[in-house]
Image (spheres, helix red, strand yellow):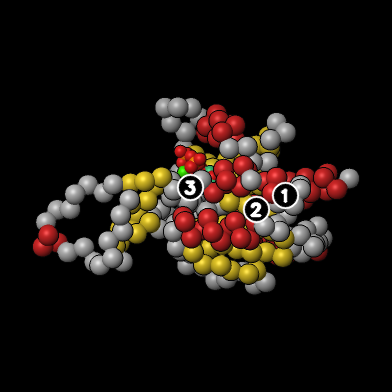
């Protein structure tokens, strides 16, 4: 990382990174959650600091040391994360959404611990959470021009298509500038230190990042971000 760390190509930039996984509480002690560790987002925050950016890290339920030099805002639920990301995005040059945001939350949150004497509870009703990245895309005209929006998509492939097909469809639905399509499963992705990805650009570009550490993958993604910020200035 030596030469990269030495080149402050994100100097003067405000980079917002969301990381971790949201928790959607059923009662004060129970929640619907996911297994996102926050490692990739924390790696991005560290890499952005190393490249000279002012970094706001919106962290959802992450048990990792705070990256030195980043401002950390802790959140629990998707609704908390939405508020924190929108606030930080107001003057951001780049927003990177690595957080695994729950798509749904329990429609009701009970304010005391649910007790088993009451018997098996009724099925949990869910309601939709806002899609924060889609909101950022929809409202981008209200913020500094040239703001770059980066999404992450963890895909395993399935009956609806392979990882890349699903990634392209996601980018078409939610047109961020870059979508980092993460292959998960088989020693990749959640809760491990390595990742591989294909980065899809709204300009039609495709960049493959072979299996590497989450730190190096973060720098490769920021290479693409920095190139697009430069292109905007010129
Ligand atoms: N995202 C978000 N708000 C949500 C859900 C997702 O901002 N409520 C963001 C994630 O942070 C990520 C991107 O959208 O950057 C893609 O998330 P993903 O879960 O892969 O895609 P979805 O659009 O939610 O589609 P699905 O879960 O059905 O694959
Ligand atoms: Ca989702």
For marks 3 and 1, give the CA distance: 21 Å
Compare residues 210 and 45 and report the one nearer the observer: 45
**Cβ(mark 1) to ligand 1 < 8 Å?**
no
Give residue 180's quadrant in the image.
Answer: top right
Give the side of residue 29 with respect to residue 225, left or right.
Answer: left
Evaluate if marks 1 and 2 touch, with contact meaning CB atoms under 8 Å apart.
yes
Q: Which residue is mark 1?
A: 147
Disc 3 packing (10 Å; few <14; some 14–19; many ≥20): some
Asked if one can make out residue 232 in the rendered structure from this viewpoint, the answer is yes
Asked if one can make out residue 194 in the rendered structure from this viewpoint, the answer is no
Q: Residue at x 63, y 61 (%)?
A: 88
Q: Residue at x 89, y 45 (%)?
A: 234
Q: Position of residue 176 (x, y in %)?
A: 64, 41
Q: Earlier in the sequence, mark 2 or mark 3?
A: 2
For marks 1 and 2, give the CA distance: 8 Å
Give the side of residue 63 with respect to residue 16, left or right.
Answer: left
Q: Residue at x 74, y 63 (%)?
A: 53
For marks 2 and 3, give the CA distance: 17 Å
Disc assigned to residue 95? 2
Disc assigned to residue 130? 3
Q: Position of residue 60 (x, y in %)?
A: 49, 61
| 27 versus 96 height, above or below | below
Disc 2 packing (10 Å; few <14; some 14–19; many ≥20): many
Badge 2 element: strand
Q: Residue furthest front?
A: 142
Badge 3 element: loop
Is label 2 or label 3 in front? Answer: 3
């Amino acid at each position: 990382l030596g030469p990269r760390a030495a080149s402050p190509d994100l100097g003067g930039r405000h980079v917002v990174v969301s990381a971790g996984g949201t928790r959607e509480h059923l009662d004060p002690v129970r929640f619907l959650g996911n297994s996102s560790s926050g490692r990739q987002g924390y790696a991005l925050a560290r890499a952005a600091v190393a490249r000279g950016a002012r970094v706001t890290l919106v962290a959802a339920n992450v048990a990792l040391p705070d990256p030195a030099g980043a401002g950390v805002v802790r959140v629990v639920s998707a609704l908390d994360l939405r508020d924190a990301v929108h606030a930080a995005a107001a003057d951001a040059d780049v927003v990177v959404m690595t957080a695994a945001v729950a798509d749904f939350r329990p429609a009701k949150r009970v304010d005391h611990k649910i007790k088993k004497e009451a018997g098996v509870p009724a099925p949990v009703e869910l309601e939709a959470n806002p899609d924060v990245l889609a909101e950022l895309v929809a409202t981008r005209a209200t913020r500094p021009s040239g703001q770059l929006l980066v999404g992450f998509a963890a895909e395993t492939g399935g009956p609806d298509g392979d990882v890349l097909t699903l990634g392209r469809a996601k980018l078409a639905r939610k047109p961020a500038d870059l979508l980092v399509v993460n292959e998960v499963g088989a020693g990749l992705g959640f809760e491990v230190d390595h990742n591989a990805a294909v980065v899809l650009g709204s300009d039609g570009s495709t960049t493959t990042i072979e299996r590497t550490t989450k730190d190096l993958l973060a720098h490769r993604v920021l290479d693409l971000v920095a190139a697009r910020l430069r292109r905007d200035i010129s």
